[in-house]
Every structure is written in C-alpha cells, then in structure tokens.
Image: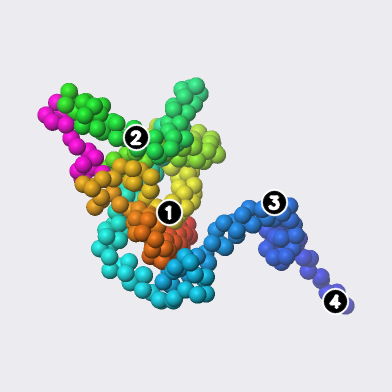
Amino acid sequence: MKTAVKSKKHPKSPEEIKTNRSFVQRMGLQWQLILMSIPFLIHRIIFSYVPLKGWLMAFQNYKPAKGWLDQEFVGLKWFKQLFSDTVFITDIRNTFAMSLINLSLGFITAIALALLLNEIKNTFAKRFVQTVSYMPHFLSWVIVAGLVQNMLSTDSGIVNDLIVKLGISDTKIPFLSEPKYFWGIVGASNVWKEVGWNTIIYLAAMSSIDPSLYEAASMDGAGRFMKMFHVTLPGIKTTFMMLLIMNIGHILEAGFELQYLLTNGLISSVSETIDIYVLKYGIQIGNYSLGTAAGIFKSVVSITLVFIANKLAGEENKLI
C-alpha cells in the first residue's frame, strides 16, 4: 500500500508576505506615519490645490468686480495671445537659457565641491570650508543683487578695478549694460549663493558609502582620483538622479528677484523672465487672465518635464 507523500510547504519570506498583503493591511501597519502626515496633507490641499480654482481666470475675460460664474468665458483667447506675443516668446527663451545655466552649473560645482570636501581629512578645515561656502545661502537676493551691482560697477567696482590694474583690459567693462554678459552674471551669482547649500546633500550621500569599497579599490591600486570616479560618483548616482528630477520640475523658474533687480532698458531683451512678464503684463496692468494663462503654461511644462525625467531615470535603472 502506497502512502501519499505530503509535500511540505516552505515558509514564505518576509518579502512575499509583504507583497501578498492588501493595501488596507499595509495602511493599517503604518497608521502612525499616516497620522503624522495628515497635517502636511491638509496644508498642501489648502494652499496648493484649493487655489487651482483660480485657473478659471485663464479661460475668462476676468473682471475683479464680478463673481466666478458671472465672468465672460473666452476659451483659449489668452493662450493664443501669449504665443503670438514676441515678448513672451523671448521671455521663454531667456527663462530656459538661465534655468539650464543655473541647473548645469549648480550640479557641476556642488558635486565638485562635495568631492573635494570629502577628500579633506582635517575635520576642522573641512567644517570651516563647508560653513563658509553655505553661509551666502542665507542672504536675500536683494543683498546679493546689491553686492553684484557694487562689484561690477564701472565707477568703483572691484572687478573692473582688477581688470584694469592687471592689464586684462585698458578700459572698464560695462557688465550690467551689455546683454552678452547678463546670463553669465546670473549663473555665477547663483553658484556663489547656493553651491555650499547644495553640497550638503551630496556629502550626506557620500558618508553612507560602504568604506569597504574604498579599501577594495586601494588593494587594487586605485588612487584618490580613481576612487572618486569609480566609487564615490557611482555611490551618489541615486541622489543625483533624485535631485535632477526635482530640479527639472523648476526648469521654468530661472529666478525673479535677481533678474528684476539687475535689469534695465539696455539688457531687458535677455533679462526678463516669465515671472517678470506676469508681473508687468498680468498684475501691474490688471490683466489677471493673461497672467494666469502664463502661469498655467509654466505648470504644464514643469509637470511634463518631471514625468519625462522620471521615466528616463527608470529606464536607465533597468538597463543597469
């Protein structure tokens, strides 16, 4: 007589148990975290989603004295006016150009400074350099704009004085009066103000890299630069991609304060951004519908770029 051999079931791994749990069960296990996030969720809904009803103004001939339902709906009139306005097209170009300059310079300088600080073995020197580099982050753009104007002034600016005394140029250069210099000034100002602050995140990511990887690289004969390229940089790749996705969402926010404070009639063709356009033609004139249409354009482009960057990052991770 043959006896049936019962197959023994292997115990499920924690990953399999976690996968088989329903959404409600997983929510129940994390109720403390959900409870802590409720105030932030309420804040986000009140201040970020409720105001979205104002987007209706972009499709209306909005008059402040009338109610929402009493406004005249004009469809896409203001969007057509936006993209037929050469000033707005120029402002889009300026915004994209300055955003890309700030984005690329910001990432390159922050990673470079983080790599250099990571190689400093003296703790006091490392903290001193880090503190000095991120202190400008706490200055307002009004102060930064004043410093830039004073340093680049043709009357008593230190930059022009050095250029003349070092023999680089026989005459002082009107940096704030010639359009070709403005984008570089904005990029340099952003780097000076934010490079130390942006470096903090990369230093935190570098501190979490397994030290045994550096030891293994040393045993293989790798020097400092080889360790940077083959251990440190791959170790902060995830952090870099996350920050890139977050910053791409702000690609149409090249800044407002610095451009607005430094602009003048001679360089307005390269200094005006979409935010300045909204201020001049939307708020100051009182054409709120036009300003809202420009804001919707910014939001749609930013959301689209975030999804594209997120998709590309996911595809790259699959290839790796």
The amino acid marked with disc number 4 is: Lys
| Crowd tier of the residue under label 2, counting other residues whose Cα lies within 10 Å: few below 14, some 14–19, many 20 or above | few
* Residue 287 lies in quadrant: bottom left
Q: Which residue lies furthest to the right in this view?
A: 1
Residue at 40% over, 52% down = 253
The amino acid marked with disc number 3 is: Met
Report if residue 27 is visible in the image.
yes
| Crowd tier of the residue under label 1, counting other residues whose Cα lies within 10 Å: few below 14, some 14–19, many 20 or above | some
Chief secondary structure of the magenta span?
A: loop
Please give the range of residues in magenta. Answer: 167-183
| Crowd tier of the residue under label 3, counting other residues whose Cα lies within 10 Å: few below 14, some 14–19, many 20 or above | few
Please report contact status of discs 4 and 1: CB closer than 8 Å, yes or no. no
How far across and down, in percent of the image, does residue 143 sit?
A: 39, 35
State the mark number for residue 2. 4
Which mark is first along the chain, 1 or 4? 4
Q: Does the magenta stretch include residue 182?
A: yes
Q: Which mark's residue is nearer the viewer, 3 or 2?
A: 2
User: Alpha carbon of mark 3 to alpha carbon of mark 1: how far?
Assistant: 28 Å
Residue under label 3: 36
Residue under label 1: 250
Figure quadrant of the N terminus: bottom right
Which mark is first along the chain, 2 or 3? 3
Q: Nearer the viewer, residue 184 or 103?
A: 184
